[in-house]
């Protein structure tokens, strides 16, 4: 399993060692569940990041290995990863929070409050569903090989989660088995889906999609980016979507001086504390529109 880029040895270490250890350990020793469910949340979010990176820049040269890796990540992420192609690669990168983007942050509100940010998942997921359905329909009509891949990935995902739920119940009975499943793979899937959509919101709300570099909010702390495979360097990613994640810090450094200072934050957690906790009391901590709004007329 030699990756195309050497940096992805760490991707494989996370995916094939950390992910299963973090989620399966409570199956064997359920008393550790209380300590492992926060790790399961991290696994879900990180699996989403890995799926995102894999869809932009596949880990392997071999198509079969890439297909297996996609299916493996799907189990921890909480959804078949093919959905990244129509909703993110083909839609979000094309429209970048402007009209036509299924994931626009301003569909029902132009505010950036905790309520809007935390419930954005339900809005975004609803509108992404239509894009996914259209993609699957086109594949079924025009690309049989792609449609077979989609079908296999869906079946593998459902079978894995049914099997994992059944295993937890067989080992620990209905009540505690359900709790073990929900605290491991259930928590991972929930965080993978909600977390990726939430971060998409904070990376684009009140940014300027018409700008060369101010179209995205960046989170630049070294430790945070180490833990999430440089997912914080979002402007560089949008400007170089095919670049491997290991190149993003260098690409960000080239444009950092041209990015509005408010769009380079140390961490997501710090940003949320300021914008949503302090901002709920003190208006000066809330975000403000930088440049031209996404819903404004094209310049």
Image (cartoon, rainbow, N blue to C red):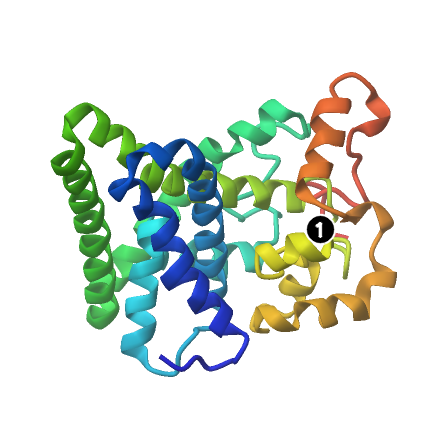
Residue 154 percent coordinates (x, y) = 23, 54
Relative placement, left or right, of 112 versus 66 is right
Q: Quadrant of the N terminus?
A: bottom left
Tell me what residue is drawn at x 73 percent, y 40 percent: 206
- Seen from the viewer's position, the closer of residues 295 and 149 is 149
Tell me what residue is drawn at x 42 percent, y 68 percent: 12
Relative placement, left or right, of 245 versus 57 is right
Relative placement, left or right, of 7 versus 21 is right
Which residue is farthest top? 281
Q: Which corner quadrant of the image does residue 172 belong to?
A: top left
Q: Is residue 13 visible?
A: yes
Question: Which element carries disc 1, helix, strand or loop?
Answer: strand
Tell me what residue is drawn at x 29 percent, y 40 percent: 29
Disc 1 marks which residue? Answer: 219
Residue 216 percent coordinates (x, y) = 70, 52
Residue 60 percent coordinates (x, y) = 40, 78
Q: Which corner quadrant of the image does residue 144 belong to?
A: bottom left
| Residue 288 to residue 159: above or below | above
Q: Is residue 55 visible?
A: no
Q: Residues within 10 Å of mark 1 (few under 14, many from 20)?
A: many
Residue 137 percent coordinates (x, y) = 26, 56
| Residue 140 to residue 31: above or below | below
């Amino acid at each position: 399993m030699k990756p195309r880029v050497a940096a992805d040895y760490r991707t494989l270490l996370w995916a094939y060692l950390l992910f299963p250890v973090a989620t399966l350990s409570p199956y064997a020793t359920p008393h550790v569940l209380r300590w492992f469910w926060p790790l399961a949340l991290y696994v879900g979010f990180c699996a989403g990041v890995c799926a995102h990176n894999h869809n932009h820049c596949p880990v392997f040269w071999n198509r079969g290995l890439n297909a297996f890796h996609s299916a493996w990540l799907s189990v921890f992420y909480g959804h078949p990863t093919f959905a990244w192609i129509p909703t993110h690669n083909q839609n979000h990168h094309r429209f970048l929070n402007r009209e036509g983007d299924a994931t626009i942050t301003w569909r029902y509100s132009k505010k950036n409050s905790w309520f809007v940010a935390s419930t954005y998942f339900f809005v975004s997921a609803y509108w992404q569903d239509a894009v996914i359905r259209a993609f699957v329909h086109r594949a079924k009509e025009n690309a049989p090989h792609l449609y077979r891949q989609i079908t296999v990935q869906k079946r593998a995902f459902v079978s894995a989660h049914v099997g994992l739920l059944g295993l937890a119940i067989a080992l620990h009975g209905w009540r505690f088995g359900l709790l073990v499943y929900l605290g491991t793979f259930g928590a991972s899937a929930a965080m993978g889906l909600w977390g990726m959509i939430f971060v998409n919101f904070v990376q684009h709300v009140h940014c300027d999609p018409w700008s060369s570099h101010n179209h995205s909010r960046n989170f630049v702390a070294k430790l945070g980016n180490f833990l999430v495979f440089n997912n914080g360097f979002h402007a560089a990613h949008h400007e170089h979507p095919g670049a491997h994640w290991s190149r993003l810090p260098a690409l960000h450094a080239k444009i950092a001086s041209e990015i509005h200072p408010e769009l380079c934050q140390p961490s997501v957690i710090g940003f949320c504390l300021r914008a949503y906790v302090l901002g709920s009391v003190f208006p000066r901590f809330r975000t403000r529109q930088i440049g031209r709004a996404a819903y404004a007329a094209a310049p």
